[in-house]
Amino acid sequence: MRETELKIASTPITPFFHFDRRSGMMEFRGRSLPSSPQKFYYPIIEEIDMAFKRGVNKLTANFALEYFNTSSSKCLFNLLKKLVSYKQDGGNVVINWFYEECDDDMKETGQDYEKILGASFNHIKLN
């Protein structure tokens, strides 16, 4: 029997990841600095594919990243692209982009992803 949750603990170079398969809640939190981010993000992208193949009714993805490097940026973009694609195909997908009140760079990064992908994110300021 498949577990209902997938958790990946944070490390100094990878973010915390949690996906509750029952509720469709997905969370990224922390810093992403791996030299090979594909090793971290590829299984997560596969997990998203499997969730939609299993007929998940709703998926909420929370991105609360403090920092990520250039190589992680490409993987995050591909992950967001996958979520947006499912949303455009009629899936109930919500993307929440969290940023610290004083972190204009992270706020603008979320806005840039949103614009490039032609999607709608919820931008949530943290105090």
Image (cartoon, rainbow, N blue to C red):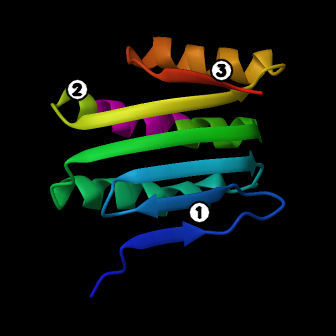
Q: Position of residue 75 (x, y in %)?
A: 56, 43
* Nearer the observer, 3 or 42: 3
Q: Which of marks 1 and 2 is nearer the N terminus?
A: 1
Q: Which of marks 2 and 3 is nearer the N terminus?
A: 2
| Quadrant assignment for the N terminus | bottom left
Tag 1 secondary structure: helix
Tag 3 secondary structure: helix
Residue 39 circle label? 1
Q: Name the residue under label 2.
A: 88
Q: Mark 3 points at which residue?
A: 109
Residue depicted at x 26% and y 45%: 58
Compared to 81, does 43 lie above or below? below
Residues rendered magenta in the picture: 77-85
The amino acid type of the residue labelled 3 equals Thr
The amino acid type of the residue labelled 1 equals Lys
The amino acid type of the residue labelled 2 equals Gln
Q: Is 122 left or right of 56, judged from the image as shown?
A: right
Residue depicted at x 48% and y 11%: 115
Q: Which of marks 3 and 1 is nearer the N terminus?
A: 1
